[in-house]
Image (cartoon, rainbow, N blue to C red):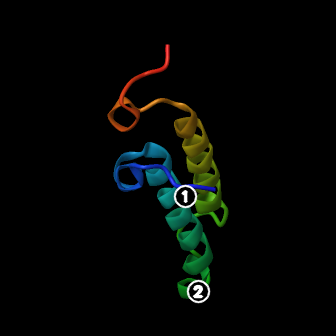
């Protein structure tokens, strides 16, 4: 396994990375929220459902070309 030559740009600009980070944050909220509230102000599965949707979006974003990262679109 080798990393891509522009890995810093990918970390900074790729939507799949941004969405995966958002999904991780939502998953952490789902885990941590019950520690502070006996009865959380949101439905218990809300953040898990949002994390799943954002993860699906990250998968789709991974398949889409981002010209600013790859240099050109495949035609």
Q: Residue at x 55, y 58 (%)?
A: 23
Mark drawn on residue 47: none
Residue 38, given in percent of the width and then of the height, sits at 61, 84
Residue lying at the far top in this picture: please name it.
75
Q: Of residues 19 and 42, which is closer to you in this image?
A: 19
- Above or below, 50 against 61 in this view is below
CB contact under 8 Å: marks 2 and 1? no
Q: Real-space Cα distance between discs 2 and 1?
A: 19 Å
Q: Which residue is mark 2?
A: 35
Q: Of residues 23 and 17, which is closer to you in this image?
A: 17
Secondary structure under the numbered disc 2 in the rendered image: helix
Q: Of residues 63 and 31, which is closer to you in this image?
A: 63
Mark 1 surroundings within 10 Å by alpha-carbon count, few (fewer than 14), some (14 through 19), many (20 or more): many
Secondary structure under the numbered disc 1 in the rendered image: helix
Mark drawn on residue 23: 1
Reading the chain from its start, which is encountered first: label 2 or label 1?
1
Say left or right for 38 vs 74: right
- Quadrant housing residue 30: bottom right
Say left or right for 62 vs 14: right
- The N terminus sits in image quarter: bottom right
Q: Nearer the viewer, mark 2 or mark 1?
A: 1
Residue 32, given in percent of the width and then of the height, sits at 56, 80
Q: Residue at x 58, y 86 (%)?
A: 35
Q: Residue at x 53, y 71 (%)?
A: 29
Mark 2 surroundings within 10 Å by alpha-carbon count, few (fewer than 14), some (14 through 19), many (20 or more): few
Q: Residue at x 50, y 46 (%)?
A: 16
């Amino acid at each position: 396994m080798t990393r891509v030559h522009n890995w810093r740009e990918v970390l900074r600009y790729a939507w799949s990375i941004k969405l995966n980070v958002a999904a991780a944050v939502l998953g952490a909220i789902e885990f941590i929220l019950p520690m502070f509230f006996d009865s959380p102000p949101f439905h218990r599965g809300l953040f898990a459902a949002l994390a799943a949707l954002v993860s699906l979006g990250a998968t789709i974003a991974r398949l889409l070309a981002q010209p600013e990262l790859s240099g050109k679109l495949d035609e």
